[in-house]
Image (tube, helix red, strand yellow):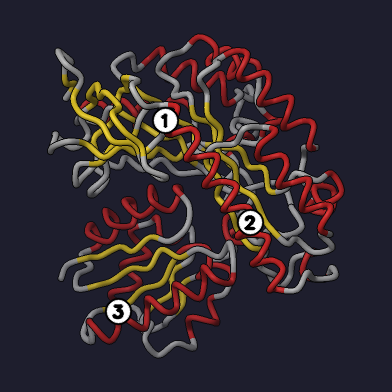
Amino acid sequence: MSIEVINFGCRLNLYEGEVIRQQAQSAGLSNAIIFNSCAVTSEAERQVRQAIRKSRKENPNAKIIVSGCSAQVHPDMYQSMEEVDKIIGNQEKLEKSGYEFAIGNTEKVLVNDIMSVKETASHMVTSFEGKARAFVQIQNGCDHRCTFCIIPYGRGNSRSAPMGEIVAQVKNLVAIGYNEVILTGVDISDYGKDLPGKPTLGQMMSRLLALVPQLQRLRLSSIDAVEVDEDLYRLIAEEPRLMPHIHISLQAGDDMVLKRMKRRHSRQDILDFCMRVRALRPDVVFGADIIAGFPTETEEMFENTLKLVAEANLTYLHVFAYSSRPGTPAARMPQVPKAIRKERANRLRVAGDKQLADYLVSQISNVAKVVVERNRHGRTEHFAPVELDRDYEVGSVIEVKITDATAHTLRGQLHMNAAVAA
């Protein structure tokens, strides 16, 4: 074994997982398993610990290193695990020196104050192992303090990558064959507020698309609807290379719950946003993160969230049952019983499954441009999963005639006379 990186959680971790791999290799680390952890819920942390114990049993001689948000916020938890050799913080995991520490230092923990970090370093990632699309980090950290969220304490305050560095990274990825790029971060809607001239997310994307005309497909990870700027609205309307799939950081569809969460939007804001974007790009689809069973949530409040799924016509739901995070204001609020949280999360998932199934059926007989993934799978412009009729080159973009749909995926075959973009 050389180096294995196991990523948990968000798309930003997928990007940083490749940075970790490169920096660890550069430092000369070998025979190591690096867990790039998540702290968004207690269940996420439980899964990390479970995976660590399993890996130790299967790899008794490997060096086990834990990094990521959970390691940053709860280093003591991993320090007490005999299976773990080293704990490296969220900033240190992106630096060669972090893995030099892992090789040659007798101490177990290297976790510094994440709030002291003022810049987002540019890392020229040259490949994404096994991925059909590339991720580019444009921002890190968060200046907002939602009452349920511990992530700012794992990631620090918001800081943006300079536009020139983002453009250089995307140019490099396109030059080596990537046709689709996803812009990612912790709170990308806040992009540019810390940079000279305070460029907006839409302004940065406009420059990126103008300077990298060879880029075929650009996606956003997750945005706050009320923070979308006019340049981004213009791109949604006019730029076909910006994919018609927008994932909203929603969290709830009831105004009182949103207020207690300290979110920046109201229920009506989400409905207005979806209506405006659909007017600009009628074929757009929306995804959303939703928390079920937030403290003080009544059945009526939950029903408002459930109704919003259909009212806003959300296609892809990412549902969490609320998980109390010690040290957050929400942890001190009256808690909804766990059984009710779980039941509400299940009801949301059922609603989400229906929304997705209805959308997939609507795509039968359409022709879609699909980025090919491994094992005869791919994703349409709208991020719908597709089972393909045969193997195609991973990362290529092909035109596919949609022939059928199941509850969770489309099926299709190469469109007659279609060209394949390598």
Q: Amino acid at mark 2?
A: Arg
Q: Amino acid at mark 1?
A: Ile
Q: Residue at x 26, y 40 (%)?
A: 387
- Element carrying mark 1: helix
Say above or below: 321 vs 183.
below
- Element carrying mark 3: helix
Question: Between marks 2 and 3, how big is the CA–CA gap?
Answer: 34 Å
Q: Position of residue 363 (x, y in %)?
A: 40, 26
Residue corresponding to mark 1: 166
How many neighbours does mark 3 have within 10 angstroms: few (below 14), some (14-19), or many (20 or more)?
some
Question: Between marks 1 and 2, how big is the CA–CA gap?
Answer: 40 Å
Say above or below: 187 vs 13.
above
- Element carrying mark 2: helix
Say above or below: 263 vs 4.
above
The reply, left or right, for residue 237 in relation to residue 33 is right
Residue corresponding to mark 2: 347
The picture quadrant where one finds residue 373 is top left
Residue corresponding to mark 3: 55
Relative to the observer, which residue lies in front, 416 or 95? 416
| Tally of marks | 3
The disc, 1 or 2, on the residue closer to the chain's N-terminal end is: 1
The disc, 3 or 1, on the residue closer to the chain's N-terminal end is: 3
The reply, left or right, for residue 351 in relation to residue 260 is left
How many neighbours does mark 1 have within 10 angstroms: few (below 14), some (14-19), or many (20 or more)?
many
Q: Are marks 3 and 1 in contact (CB under 8 Å)?
A: no
Q: Of tags 3 and 1, which is closer to the observer?
A: 3
Quarter that holds the N terminus: bottom left
The picture quadrant where one finds residue 421 is top left
Q: Position of residue 14 (x, y in %)?
A: 38, 51
